[in-house]
Image (tube, rainbow, N blue to C red):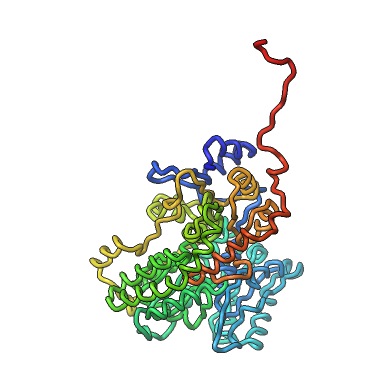
């Protein structure tokens, strides 16, 4: 069942007039005849609406910084903010030195009322001293939460004094939750400081192997990065660093020696990708390792970039080998999933990426959107010059970088670069909207009211989103696939990850649980009629 403007108007009519005008800008029905449909994004959520968004602190510490395993990440703020200090996304990490893997710990200054009144700088200083005495990390990050910004603690001064005292990198991140309209602001803040204080500080001048790459925007949820790296290394690539899943401070310092940067999650880390290109001359390639065909396309695009016939041949050999293993298994799951529909509302690029994997199982995505996207995530990078900067966006300063006089090097000639851009998505992301089908819904910052109304109307067979709305949807009798931490499953990336995803989705469909749940629309009819007295008017 496709939705039309009349149905959309009926849903939005429950809002006050001003809220209705606001939300209508964030929702579009895909129209193939229009070259581009503009959607509002990266603006403040309407107060009172139950949103799935996180805060700037969640984006900085919870997403980008948190997976770096050899760094102690201190949250300066009340213990409640330690929710993201303890990680929530199952960012897996292994270390050759088990004493240098701090992902299982939660470091918080646990600010109390007295700290809010008198300041928390001394408490933070004491905590850094304790961390150095007990854990001896390679570096320390300090992430600010809302109260810290309100009382004016000078994190920069504390970090500078600690760095001079202990002789390691101590970085402060003014990522107070209110700094932006969503966690996207925190991504930007983290990108800036990692680029300024970590990347390029290593001593390497050349990569230790052939085809050196960085993986950007890959957070190793459920082991995704390990599955991707398995394939890449078998082909012959040298993975210099991963930003930031199973990543480390020591690896990140030498990211400048890579010859290509792969961008998986465009939203969270495109800032670093662009700065690396400016400073070191390293192009970035948009990739997607979610889904079999998407993985194949990404691997082939990488081989085209390097242009080595041996690499191209090896890529095809590995693709053929992997397909021979996974295709027969996928067929059994397709028979169960064929013809079903999905909602796919997830953060980062997942709302886009997972549509291909759903499609390979025969599941059509009828509604998709992002929690914290910008317009270019929907409409493609062509719209960036047209995006108007508002006060919230200007609140996050851009880091100005220039070519490194010693290390800048064009990895490919300008002539070949232009040729490659016509073949592969170099320095380019086309956005999600272009792949949505006619009549399907694209919704930015979907809230709980709209979620329930669209579910009642379209009745999807599966709802892919985060943990905040998972249980509400399940109580409506709809299987929910949690794609922020994979419901303790995974990996879902790469060839074998696609099989694991297919297995989990199929289990969601065939479980007898749903026989014991009655969706709301089965208790209340959509159409109600009234029999009026008086008989036939023509009699």
Q: Position of residue 368 (x, y in %)?
A: 52, 52
Along the viewing direction, whichever of 217 and 192 lies nearer the viewer: 217
Q: Position of residue 433 (x, y in %)?
A: 45, 51
**Residue at 28%, 73% in the rendered image:** 307
Along the viewing direction, whichever of 505 and 11 lies nearer the viewer: 505
Q: Residue furthest left?
A: 415
Along the viewing direction, whichever of 203 and 510 lies nearer the viewer: 510
Q: Quadrant of residue 345?
A: bottom right
Q: Position of residue 100 (x, y in %)?
A: 58, 86
Location of the N terminus (image quadrant): top right
Decide if residue 373 is on the left or right side of residue 115. Answer: left
Along the viewing direction, whichever of 353 and 403 lies nearer the viewer: 353
Q: Is residue 191 visible?
A: no
Q: Quadrant of residue 60?
A: bottom right
Decide if residue 152 is on the left or right side of residue 3. Answer: right
In the image, is residue 491 above or below residue 10?
below
- Please count the marks in the image: 0
Q: Residue furthest top?
A: 539
Q: Position of residue 236 (x, y in %)?
A: 37, 80
Q: Quadrant of residue 32?
A: top left
Location of the C terminus (image quadrant): top right
**Residue at 52%, 80% in the rendered image:** 248
**Residue at 46%, 45% in the rendered image:** 30
């Amino acid at each position: 069942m496709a939705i039309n403007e009349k149905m959309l108007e009926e849903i939005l009519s429950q809002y006050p007039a001003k809220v209705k005008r606001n939300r209508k800008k964030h929702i579009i029905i895909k129209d193939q005849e229009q070259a581009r449909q503009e959607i509002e994004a990266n603006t403040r959520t309407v107060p009172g609406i139950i949103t799935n968004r996180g805060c700037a602190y969640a984006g900085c510490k919870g997403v980008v910084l948190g997976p770096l395993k050899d760094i102690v990440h201190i949250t300066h703020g009340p213990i409640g903010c330690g929710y993201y200090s303890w990680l929530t996304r199952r960012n897996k990490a292994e270390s050759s030195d088990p004493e240098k893997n701090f992902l299982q710990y939660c470091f918080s200054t646990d600010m109390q009322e007295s700290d809010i009144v008198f300041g928390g700088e001394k408490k933070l200083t004491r905590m850094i001293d304790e961390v150095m005495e007990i854990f001896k990390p390679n570096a320390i990050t300090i992430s600010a939460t809302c109260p810290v910004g309100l009382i004016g603690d000078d994190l920069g001064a504390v970090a500078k004094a600690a760095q001079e005292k202990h002789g390691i990198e101590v970085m402060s991140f003014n990522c107070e939750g209110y700094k932006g309209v969503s966690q996207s602001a925190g991504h930007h803040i983290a990108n800036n400081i990692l680029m300024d204080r970590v990347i390029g500080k290593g001593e390497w001048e050349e990569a230790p192997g052939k085809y050196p790459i960085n993986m950007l925007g890959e957070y190793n949820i459920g082991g995704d990065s390990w599955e991707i790296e398995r394939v890449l290394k078998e082909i012959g690539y040298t993975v210099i660093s991963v930003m930031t899943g199973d990543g480390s401070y020591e690896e990140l310092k030498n990211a400048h020696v890579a010859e290509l940067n792969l961008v998986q999650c465009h939203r969270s880390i495109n800032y670093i990708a662009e700065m690396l290109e400016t400073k070191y001359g390293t192009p970035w390639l948009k990739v997607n390792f979610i889904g079999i065909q998407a993985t194949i396309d990404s691997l082939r695009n990488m081989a085209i970039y390097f242009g080595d016939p041996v690499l191209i041949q090896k890529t095809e050999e590995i693709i053929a080998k992997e397909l021979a293993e996974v295709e027969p298994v996928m067929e059994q799951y397709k028979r169960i999933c064929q013809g079903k529909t999905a909602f796919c509302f997830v953060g980062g690029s997942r709302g886009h990426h997972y549509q291909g994997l759903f499609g390979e199982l025969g599941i059509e995505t009828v509604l998709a959107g992002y929690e914290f996207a910008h317009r270019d995530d929907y409409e493609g990078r062509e719209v960036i010059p047209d995006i108007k900067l508002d006060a919230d966006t200007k609140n996050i300063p851009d880091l100005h970088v220039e070519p490194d006089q010693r290390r800048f090097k064009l990895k490919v000639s300008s002539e070949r670069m232009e040729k490659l851009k016509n073949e592969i998505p170099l320095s380019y992301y086309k956005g999600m909207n272009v792949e949505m089908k006619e009549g399907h819904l694209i919704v930015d910052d979907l809230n709980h009211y709209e979620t329930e109304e669209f579910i009642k109307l379209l009745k999807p067979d599966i709802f892919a989103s985060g943990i905040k709305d998972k249980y509400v949807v399940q109580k409506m009798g709809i299987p929910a696939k949690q794609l922020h931490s994979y419901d303790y499953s995974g990996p879902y990336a790469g060839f074998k990850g696609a099989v694991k995803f297919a297995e989990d989705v199929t289990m969601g469909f065939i479980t007898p649980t749903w026989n014991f749940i009655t969706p709301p629309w089965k208790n209340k009819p959509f159409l109600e009629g009234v029999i009026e007295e008086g008989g036939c008017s023509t009699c």
